[in-house]
Image (cartoon, grey):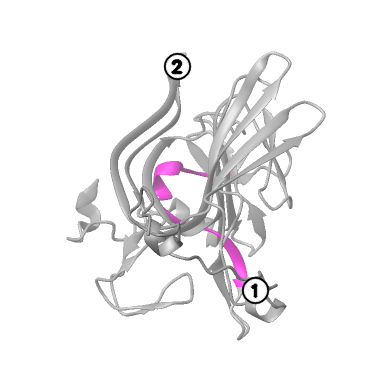
């Protein structure tokens, strides 16, 4: 008998050291089985446009829960001023006592109440001259924001109740009481006779903590703070600004030149409290409660 080059009488798969492979037909998965599978792309890219700009939004499919403290923040420091300036800024806080928090959830004293966000994104706006602006935000966000703010550019969606019990949209004003969304230092109720001026005002530093979010029915006749899709910080090149669209398409926010922070909140507070010596008091943002010593 003659052996071949492999030392075998015939070329067989076992002689060559090869393992047989079993082939099978692919079968479709039922809708019920597919319904048990969830998933999300790590990054989603969208292209949008309006009459003035083309937009590219890049969204990450992640969730965030955080508590952050920042000593000092200055953004847009140019032309002898700052678009946004704040010290002792914090996202999230610590419960001072047992009980239900703004989001309808119960926490024990000392528990962290995090700032919650999903789907962080970066969005670019371009026109014929190039990059007109960009912004950073979240598809959904809610949580506490605390700061000692001296200059603010943007919008704060606070409601203020006057001495007659009438609720007003809060407006921003400069040091002389003129309405502005650019480098404001005061917040209050506009003058009914001349909305471009302040009727009742308080320093922005009196608004030490607020809750970012949207009012939501808690199912028992009350309200809690739900998620908002309109929390972002934008940077715009020109005076005309950029009209940024909410991730869900519900709103369009017109952001002016420079830094613009859109800060939606579900809060309604009395103007008299805001003007009081303590203003809207600060939540606990350090593990050791600093109380009034923080500032």
Quadrant location of the C terminus in the rendered image: top left
Please tell me which residue lies in front, 258 or 290: 258
Mark 1 is surrounded, within 10 Å at the Cα level, by few (under 14), some (14 to 19) or many (20 or more) other residues, namely few
- How far is mark 1 from mark 2, CA to CA? 55 Å
Q: Is residue 110 left or right of residue 166?
A: left
Residue 276 picture quarter: bottom left
Of circles 1 and 2, the one toward us is 1
Residue beneath disc 2: 78
Please tell me which residue lies in front, 71 or 20: 20
For residue 134, above or below residue 195: above
The question of residue 101 being in magenta is answered with: no
Please tell me which residue lies in front, 19 or 4: 4
Q: Position of residue 14 (x, y in %)?
A: 40, 64
Q: Position of residue 176 (x, y in %)?
A: 53, 28
Secondary structure beneath dot 1 equals helix
Quadrant location of the N terminus in the rendered image: bottom left
Region of the chain picked out in magenta, as a range: 200-216
The question of residue 207 being in magenta is answered with: yes
Q: Position of residue 227 (x, y in %)?
A: 56, 62
Q: Is residue 228 left or right of residue 49?
A: left
Secondary structure beneath dot 2 equals strand
Residue beneath disc 1: 34
Q: Position of residue 43 (x, y in %)?
A: 55, 46
Q: Earlier in the sequence, mark 1 or mark 2?
A: 1
Q: Residue furthest front?
A: 1
């Amino acid at each position: 008998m003659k052996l071949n080059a492999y030392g075998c009488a015939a070329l067989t798969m076992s002689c060559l050291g090869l393992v047989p492979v079993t082939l099978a037909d692919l079968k479709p998965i039922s809708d019920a089985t597919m319904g048990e599978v969830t998933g999300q792309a790590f990054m989603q890219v969208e292209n949008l446009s309006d009459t003035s700009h083309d937009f590219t939004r890049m969204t990450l499919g992640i969730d965030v829960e955080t508590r952050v403290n920042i000593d000092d923040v200055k953004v847009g420091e140019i032309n002898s001023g700052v678009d946004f300036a704040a010290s002792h800024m914090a996202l999230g806080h610590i419960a001072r006592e047992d009980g239900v928090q703004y989001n309808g959830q119960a926490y024990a004293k000392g528990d962290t109440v995090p700032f919650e966000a999903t789907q962080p994104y970066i969005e670019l706006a371009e026109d014929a001259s190039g990059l007109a602006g960009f912004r950073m935000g979240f598809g959904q966000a809610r949580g506490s924001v605390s700061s000692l703010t001296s200059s603010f550019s943007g919008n704060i969606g606070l409601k203020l109740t006057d001495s007659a019990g009438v609720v007003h949209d809060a407006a921003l004003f400069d040091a002389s009481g003129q309405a502005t969304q650019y480098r404001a230092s005061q917040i209050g109720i506009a003058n009914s006779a001349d909305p471009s001026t302040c009727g009742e005002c308080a320093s922005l530093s009196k608004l030490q903590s607020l809750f970012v979010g949207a009012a939501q029915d808690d199912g028992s006749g009350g309200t809690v703070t739900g998620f908002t899709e309109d929390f972002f910080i934008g940077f715009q090149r020109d005076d005309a600004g950029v009209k940024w669209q909410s991730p869900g398409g519900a709103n369009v926010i017109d952001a002016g030149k420079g830094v613009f922070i859109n800060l939606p909140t579900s809060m309604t507070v009395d103007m008299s409290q805001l003007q009081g010596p303590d203003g809207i008091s600060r939540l606990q943002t350090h593990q050791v409660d600093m109380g009034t010593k923080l500032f």
